[in-house]
Image: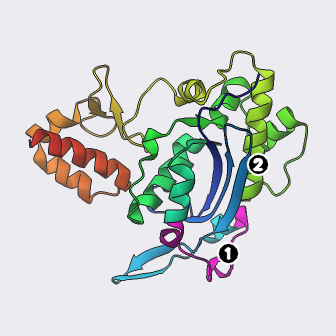
Amino acid sequence: MKLQLNRPLVFFDLETTGVNVGTDRVVEISYHKVFPNGTAEGKTLRIKPTMTLMGQEVQMPIPEGASAIHGIYDADVADCPTFKELAPELAKVFEDADIAGYNSNHFDIPLLAEEFLRSGINIDLKKCKSVDVFTIFQKHEPRNLTAAYKFYCGKNLEDAHSANADTMATYEVLMAQMERYDDLPDTVEGLNEYTAGATRFADFAGRVAYDQDGKEIFTFGKYKGMRVADVFQRDLGYYGWLQNGDFPQYTKNVFLRVYLSIKK
């Protein structure tokens, strides 16, 4: 079975300072963009992570635990461009395409969205179809990427946890999955639905879902299961608490959108 593309599909992977979508930063991004005509282009970029300290933008230290996994240390990125500097270039890569990655629906896409928001780039990745290769693998052969690469491609994954190796392995694994499983859809739209799961979320972090009527509902806290608009109308202080809380900016933007809708 061959994957049918109506528009470009970007396979990508991030290496980061940690696993907190709201506070951690990208230190390396690799992408492999496949076009409907069969051509492809790609790039791997090292990025200096930054944070605001006393009103100034300074380099964010990479924790030793993270460096031990991906092999990228503070000195390796000290002279690299920041994400904000690269954001316009990266936005052009993603804005006309759909997205594919390994466990990307739960981590890479949400964190990438946060980086774009911090950089002032108006690109909504929610509008892109997404294919999570990990979900396909988990449904058919629940193991990690190294095992998936060995199982589907018959090769050992060298330099695992480097963004380029993981990106190319993810690409090869999906192509092998398309060949192996006759029940897989052959379009990005179909694969997006196949890997998205039963619950539709309004944000990337899974804090806000849609109910059967398409209205935003909380998935956490004391108002879990209740409509966000109804909660804000009866407890406006909760909205203020959410906006000041440690939530990803994309999630806060969803709360803001609902809040503005009830103020009209």
Q: Secondary structure at mark 1?
A: loop
Most frequent secondary structure within the magenta stretch: helix
Query: Which kind of residue does numbered mark 2 sit on?
Result: Met
Q: Residue at x 35, y 33 (%)?
A: 209
Judging by the rendered image, the residue that carries numbered circle 1 is: 73
Residue 92's mark? none
Q: Nearer the viewer, mark 1 or mark 2?
A: 2
Whether residue 247 can be seen here: no
Query: Which kind of residue does numbered mark 1 sit on?
Result: Tyr
| Quarter of the image that includes the N terminus | top right
Is 260 situated above or below 142?
below
Residue 152 drawn at (x, y percent): 83, 33
Residue 10 drawn at (x, y percent): 63, 46
Q: Residue at x 55, y 43 (%)?
A: 97
Residue occupying the far front of the picture: 37
Part of the protein shown in magenta? 68-87
